[in-house]
Image: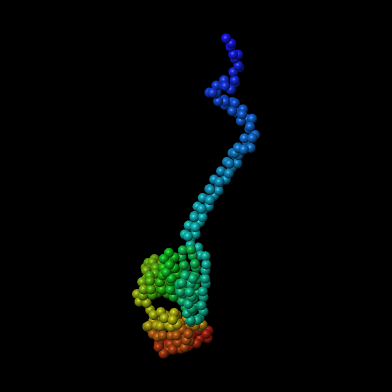
């Protein structure tokens, strides 16, 4: 019996199919061997740079929030303070009434010898009447009231038609349409702080007497070029004529002041109208050396 010689076992055939995985140490060695190559393909992040960028983004976000808050606060302060962003000045001489239309559609009719300033504010429209008389047709603006300041009286409206007259320390407010509220900066004994006028009412103010509220509106034709008087006091008639004359008018005797006068005068013919005064009242006119016209008893 012959026996076949035994061949050395094949290493591949004899290998254990359940060979154990490489150890962590072996993996680390393998990675270390290719460390530079791995770094070129998978660069490590710059942690310091990332931290700086994150801090810068947070700072910008805080600045934006702070800027928005500051802008909102500034806008609120401006709205509360209501500053003027535009002003317009108007002045007339001895001339017929002058009409002005404002940017919001309101119309002002300025009497002779009138001075006023219109101020446009963020939330209000304001007029300061320094002297003279103005008839106002105010365009309605629900959230932007219109005020007129005349000496110690402030007239506040939203949209209406009314007249304000100021001669030195005397102020008259006459309402034709709508509603107005008149607030007094300074009160005399017996006066209220506010007066609510309805159509046909007139409020008279001066420095010597408490406010007088009248329920009958006298004729106001001056805006149409006429002065109409119905049994008005002579001193009031002369005061109404004075703005249209270049020379002063004065009474020779204070007792003449209460004389009643009725009549109609054309403003563009005021010199002629003055000469007609002796025909409707027991007076005569004299020219004084200083150029003034003196009204004396006839």
Q: Which residue is most to the left? A: 215
Residue 166: x and y in percent read 45, 74
Residue that appears at 61% across and 17% down: 8
Residue 298: x and y in percent read 42, 89
Q: Is residue 295 visible?
A: no
Residue that appears at 59% across and 39% down: 45
Instruction: Identify whether 52 is placed above or below 106.
Output: above
Q: Which residue is most to the top? A: 1
Question: Which is more toward the observer, 243 or 163?
Answer: 163
Of the 4 image quadrants, the one containing the N terminus is: top right
Q: How is the image coloured?
A: rainbow
Instruction: Identify whether 171 is placed above or below 69.
Output: below
Residue that appears at 38% across and 71% down: 178
Residue that appears at 47% across and 68% down: 126
Residue 242: x and y in percent read 47, 81
Question: Which is more toward the observer, 117 or 41?
Answer: 41
Instruction: Identify whether 15 is placed above or below 106.
Output: above
Question: Which is more toward the observer, 35 or 89?
Answer: 35
User: Which of the 4 image quarters holds residue 273?
Assistant: bottom left
């Amino acid at each position: 019996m012959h026996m076949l010689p035994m061949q050395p076992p094949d290493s591949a055939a004899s290998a254990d199919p359940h060979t154990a995985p490489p150890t962590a140490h072996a993996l680390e060695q393998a990675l270390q061997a290719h460390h530079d190559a791995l770094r070129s393909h998978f660069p490590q992040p710059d942690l310091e740079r990332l931290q700086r960028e994150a801090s810068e983004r947070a700072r910008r976000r805080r600045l934006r929030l702070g800027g928005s808050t500051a802008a909102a606060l500034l806008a609120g302060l401006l709205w509360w303070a209501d500053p003027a962003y535009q002003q317009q000045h108007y002045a007339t001489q001895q001339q017929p009434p002058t009409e002005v239309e404002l940017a919001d559609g309101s119309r002002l009719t300025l009497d002779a010898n009138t001075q006023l300033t219109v101020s446009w504010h963020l939330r209000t429209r304001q007029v300061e009447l320094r002297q003279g008389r103005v008839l106002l047709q105010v365009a309605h603006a629900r959230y932007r009231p219109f005020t007129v300041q005349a000496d110690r009286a402030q007239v506040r409206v939203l949209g209406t038609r009314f007249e304000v007259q100021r001669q030195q320390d005397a102020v008259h407010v006459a309402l034709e349409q709508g509603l107005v509220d008149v607030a007094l900066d300074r009160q005399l004994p017996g006066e209220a702080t506010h007066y609510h006028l309805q159509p046909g009412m007139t409020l008279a103010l001066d420095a010597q007497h408490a406010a007088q509220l009248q329920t009958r509106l006298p004729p106001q034709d001056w805006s149409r070029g006429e002065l109409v008087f119905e049994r008005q006091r002579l001193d009031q008639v002369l005061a109404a004529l004075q703005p249209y004359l270049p020379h002063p008018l004065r009474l020779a005797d204070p007792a003449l002041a209460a004389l009643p006068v009725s009549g109609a005068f054309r403003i563009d013919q005021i010199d002629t109208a003055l000469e007609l005064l002796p025909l409707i009242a027991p007076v005569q006119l004299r020219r004084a050396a200083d150029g003034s016209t003196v009204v004396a008893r006839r």
